[in-house]
Image (cartoon, rainbow, N blue to C red):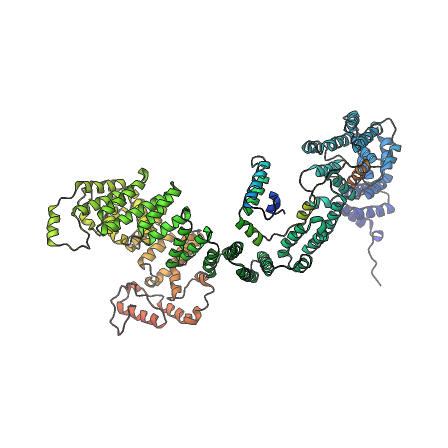
């Protein structure tokens, strides 16, 4: 699970203004009419940390353990995609053919 | 001699045959095959031969369903040795391919292609195409060179080479040469998707969706789709992939070797499935994740993995005492959530949160520290609220008050405090916090509404009107505020009239008129204005002011101001009926200490006409409203319209209307009307629980001491019936009435009442319940109403000896006997 700071793409010491700016930017990216689920997530993240008091509250009482997937997500910061070789493609195809059919 | 073991070899033929058939029916194919083999060894019968073939085929299918394709193919071959037919040959070919016997499958296909359906051959070609592409080139030897499978392979291979060398145009050219009905149609779609996966991920996704689920390329298409989708690949998905598949994803996503190494560690940690493994994994790759991220991640992990604190401190240095205590508190809270029945964790959590506040204290008054401490104190209140014990816990008001000292800018804490003191009936503290809340939040509508109510309760009507005015500025359409503002002005006007400040009273009533909306006019302002005019004129005087002979004479000479009479009449017309209007005049006159009879005599239409059903219901609403305003003489005022009202009770009210009438009379403690209504209702709806209760309640004047013992049984039955009918309100009402007994008067005869007070074991120390029970038994057949006063006093004395006292305010229906140093009992 990502923290509200991660979701809004801001550091933990961001100011109220910076948080609001990041939130509005994200809303433009995920408007409620087009991406309602993402919008809800972003809205909830903003509500959780929009004031200094709420940020303190989050820091004091948040106790959901971060998951392995959160770590994996963090580790998956994409680099430059590479084109696979023919060999790799055929090897991957061979592996996928070995999996039981659907 | 040892008993000979029964084996298929020594079983009689009939038994073995039956057993074989049974095994086949029960899908025990392996054993069925053995049994039929035995039977065939003894005698060659055609039906056994057929059954054996069937058993082989069914077992082959069962194995294939388990993914054991090699074994399935062998069984099919065994069966084929027994008979000439090629039943399920297509299945067999698939099993051969899945089992890795590609060459045999290819040869068989070439041999029998003419005998097989075209669609099956086409499907098999697709399979062989995929196998050839996956590196099984030996298969090509089994096929002639001129079939599409071999001819198109060169094109696909060339397209893949061109793609790998970033030659998009050549790739597209080769792909175009592959016909639509080629065995390589699906891989052609996949290569097309690969070409646009970076520039048009959605387009690529749509192309990949075209690969059918029955295609051998379906997993491969899914793999490419996974690489192309935005967002992160989940660990679960990654775990399902082989190493080459993972490498392909890494290429397409742009992950480097370091990342792949991290994923591998995380996959191992996932297998161990523990917080410890997770913490160790992230610390092991600290250089990859960065120090800040790793620290934050581990810190967030600590409440669910407290032993990790040691490793954390070893890696990142010591935690402050505050942080350690905070993490411990959170850890207990987490455990409490999974062990709801165990208070110990919650107690520990609370203890540690309080320790946190102590740790912060030396840093005060630094702003963040103060807010942190306040937040912790509020969090403690929240924990109590979650348990539903907030109104029983004395720590709640203290914590809230303390939190407001540290951070006064929290409205909800004020509201909670106010609610707490209201619930616990502590008016002094309640008013103190209402004032503090208004001071801190002078423009918040919910605070102003509470302030208005508090001022009205204190009869500080001017203050209440001020709050209402402010509230209407903030929220001009707030109906409740408007009503309260109006009623505050009227109440303040009454006060001013009483003290003879008529001019000021006029102003207050004008203010009230301004707040009045046409639809909501109820006549009270007009009636008050009329009464004020009559007093101003000197026609009527408050009863409290002593009348001298001269003033009497002067009053008699004065004719009542026709405008005043007109105003009162207008007020009556605005009410919904004459009886309601009259009652308003009575109450308003009494409020101003005037004689209502004198006022009513001035009105031409004040004859006592019987009230209608609607009027009675309106009257009950008015009574409820007056009761809310805190008017205490409603009971007496109601007696002045007794005759028309009593006639009206017999009108055709519905059951619900009758219940609301009874409730209204109970509320204003008019037991005579309550009894009449309840008895009329009981004639129409005998044994209806609420009416039974209202009748008994009114008969005993709301005091259980005066309830005849035979009514106890009726009440008990009524409570049970209410419970059965789902009428919780009545059952609670009856229980509430009966719990008067728990005040030390009687032990309750109803076990369910004890549920209210399970923890109150201390009662046993003060009351001899056994003696009380005996006493109660002796009183069972006594009719208090039919006893002589002396007898009642005797019983009362007996009760008193047992520690049962009758409060002084109870008006006993018996003359009191003179007693030495007596207290009214």
Q: Quadrant of the C terminus of chain A?
A: top right
Is residue B60 visible in the rendered structure shown here? yes
Residue farthest along the bottom direction in this orientation: B820
Q: Position of residue B615 (x, y in %)?
A: 28, 43
Name the one closer to the observer, B406 or B521: B406
B811 horizontally vs B366: left or right: left
Number of numbered discs visible in the structure rendering? 0
Residue lying furthest right: B141
Residue B487 sits above or below residue A85 on the image: below
In the image, taking residue B201 as reference, residue B606 lies left or right, namely left
State the residue in front, B254 or B140.
B254
Q: Position of residue A44 (x, y in %)?
A: 56, 44
| Residue B398: x %, y % from top left | 46, 60
User: Considering only vertical position in the picture, is B30 above or below B80?
Assistant: below
B531 sits left or right of B265 in the view: left
- Residue in view at x 26 percent, y 73 percent: B819
Res. B686 in view: no
Q: Quadrant of residue B815?
A: bottom left
In which quarter of the view is residue B524 placed? top left
In depth, the one of A82 and B347 nearer the eye is A82
Give how far across and how far down residue B748 sits, in percent.
Answer: 41, 64
């Amino acid at each position: 699970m990502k923290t509200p700071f991660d979701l809004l793409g801001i550091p933990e010491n961001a100011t109220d203004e910076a948080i609001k700016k990041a939130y509005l930017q994200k809303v433009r990216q995920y408007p409620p009419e087009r991406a309602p689920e993402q919008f809800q997530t972003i809205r909830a993240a903003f509500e959780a940390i929009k004031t200094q008091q709420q940020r303190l509250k989050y820091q004091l009482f948040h106790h959901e353990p971060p998951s392995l997937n959160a770590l994996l997500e963090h580790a998956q910061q994409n680099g430059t995609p590479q084109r696979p070789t023919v060999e790799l493609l055929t090897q991957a195809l061979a592996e996928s053919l070995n999996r039981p059919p659907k | 001699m040892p008993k000979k073991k029964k084996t298929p070899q020594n079983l009689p033929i009939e038994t073995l045959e039956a057993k074989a058939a049974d095994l086949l029916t029960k899908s025990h194919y392996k054993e069925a095959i053995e049994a039929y083999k035995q039977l065939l060894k003894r005698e060659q019968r055609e039906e056994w031969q057929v059954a054996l073939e069937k058993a082989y085929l069914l077992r082959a299918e069962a194995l294939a369903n388990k993914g054991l394709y090699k074994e399935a193919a062998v069984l099919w071959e065994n069966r084929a040795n027994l008979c000439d037919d090629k039943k399920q040959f297509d299945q067999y070919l698939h099993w051969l391919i899945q089992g890795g016997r590609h060459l045999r499958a290819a040869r068989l296909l070439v041999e029998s292609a003419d005998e097989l359906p075209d669609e099956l051959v086409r499907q098999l070609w697709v399979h062989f195409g995929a196998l050839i592409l996956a590196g099984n080139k030996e298969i090509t030897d089994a096929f002639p060179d001129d079939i599409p499978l071999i001819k198109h392979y060169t094109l696909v291979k060339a397209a893949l080479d061109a793609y790998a060398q970033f030659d998009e145009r050549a790739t597209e050219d080769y792909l175009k040469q592959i016909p639509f009905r080629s065995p390589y149609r699906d891989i052609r779609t996949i290569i097309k998707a690969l070409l646009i996966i970076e520039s048009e991920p959605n387009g690529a996704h749509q192309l990949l969706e075209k690969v059918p689920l029955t295609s051998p390329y379906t997993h491969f298409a899914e793999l490419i789709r996974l690489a192309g989708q935005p967002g992160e690949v989940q660990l679960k998905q990654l775990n399902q992939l082989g190493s080459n598949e993972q490498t392909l994803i890494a290429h397409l996503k742009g992950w480097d070797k370091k990342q792949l190494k991290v994923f591998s560690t995380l996959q191992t940690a996932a297998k161990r499935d523990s917080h410890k493994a997770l913490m160790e994994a992230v610390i092991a790759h600290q250089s990859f994740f960065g120090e800040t991220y790793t620290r934050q991640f581990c810190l967030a992990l600590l409440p669910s993995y407290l032993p990790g604190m040691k490793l954390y401190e070893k890696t990142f240095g010591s935690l402050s005492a505050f942080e350690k205590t905070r993490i411990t508190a959170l850890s207990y809270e987490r455990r409490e959530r999974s062990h709801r029945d165990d208070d110990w964790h919650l107690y520990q959590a609370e203890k540690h949160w309080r320790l946190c506040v102590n740790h912060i204290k030396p840093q005060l008054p630094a702003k963040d520290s103060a807010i942190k401490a306040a937040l912790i104190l509020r969090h403690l209140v929240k924990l109590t609220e979650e348990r539903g014990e907030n109104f029983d816990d004395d720590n709640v008001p203290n914590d809230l008050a303390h939190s407001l000292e540290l951070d006064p800018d929290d409205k909800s804490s004020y509201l909670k405090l106010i609610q707490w003191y209201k619930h616990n009936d502590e008016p002094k503290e309640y008013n103190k916090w209402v004032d503090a809340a208004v001071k801190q939040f002078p423009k918040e509508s919910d605070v102003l509404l509470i302030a208005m109510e508090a001022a009205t309760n204190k009869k500080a009507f001017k203050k209440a009107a001020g709050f209402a005015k402010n509230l209407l500025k903030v929220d001009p359409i707030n109906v409740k505020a408007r009503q309260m503002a109006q009623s505050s002005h009227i109440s303040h006007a009454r006060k001013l009239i009483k003290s003879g400040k008529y001019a000021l009273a006029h102003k207050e009533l004008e203010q009230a008129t301004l707040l009045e909306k046409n639809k909501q006019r109820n006549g009270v302002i007009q009636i008050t204005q009329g009464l004020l005019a009559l007093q101003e004129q000197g026609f009527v005087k408050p009863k409290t002011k002593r009348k001298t002979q001269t003033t009497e004479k002067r009053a008699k000479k004065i004719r009542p101001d026709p405008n005043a009479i007109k105003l009162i009449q207008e007020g009556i017309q605005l009410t919904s009926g004459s009886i309601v209007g009259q009652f308003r005049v009575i109450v308003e006159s009494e409020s101003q200490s005037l004689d209502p009879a004198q006022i009513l005599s001035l009105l031409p239409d004040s004859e006592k006409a019987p009230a209608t059903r609607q009027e009675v219901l309106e009257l009950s609403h008015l009574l409820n409203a007056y009761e809310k305003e805190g008017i205490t003489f409603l009971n007496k005022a109601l007696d002045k319209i007794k005759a028309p009202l009593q006639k009206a009770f017999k009108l055709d009210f519905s059951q619900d209307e009758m219940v609301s009438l009874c409730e209204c009379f109970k509320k204003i403690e008019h037991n005579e009307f309550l009894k009449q209504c309840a008895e009329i209702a009981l004639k129409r709806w005998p044994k209806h629980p609420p009416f039974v209760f209202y009748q008994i309640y009114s008969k005993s004047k709301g005091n259980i001491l005066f309830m005849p013992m035979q009514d106890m049984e009726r009440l008990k039955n009524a409570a049970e019936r209410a419970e059965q009918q789902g009428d919780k309100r009545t059952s609670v009402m009856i229980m509430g009435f009966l719990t008067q007994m728990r005040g030390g008067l009687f032990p309750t005869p109803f076990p369910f009442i004890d549920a209210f007070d399970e923890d109150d074991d201390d009662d046993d120390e003060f009351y001899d319940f056994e003696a009380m029970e005996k006493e109660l038994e002796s009183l069972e057949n006594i009719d208090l109403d039919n006893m002589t006063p002396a007898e009642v006093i005797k019983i009362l004395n007996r009760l008193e000896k047992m520690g049962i006292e009758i409060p002084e305010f109870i008006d006993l229906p018996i003359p009191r006997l003179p007693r030495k140093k007596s207290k009214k009992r």
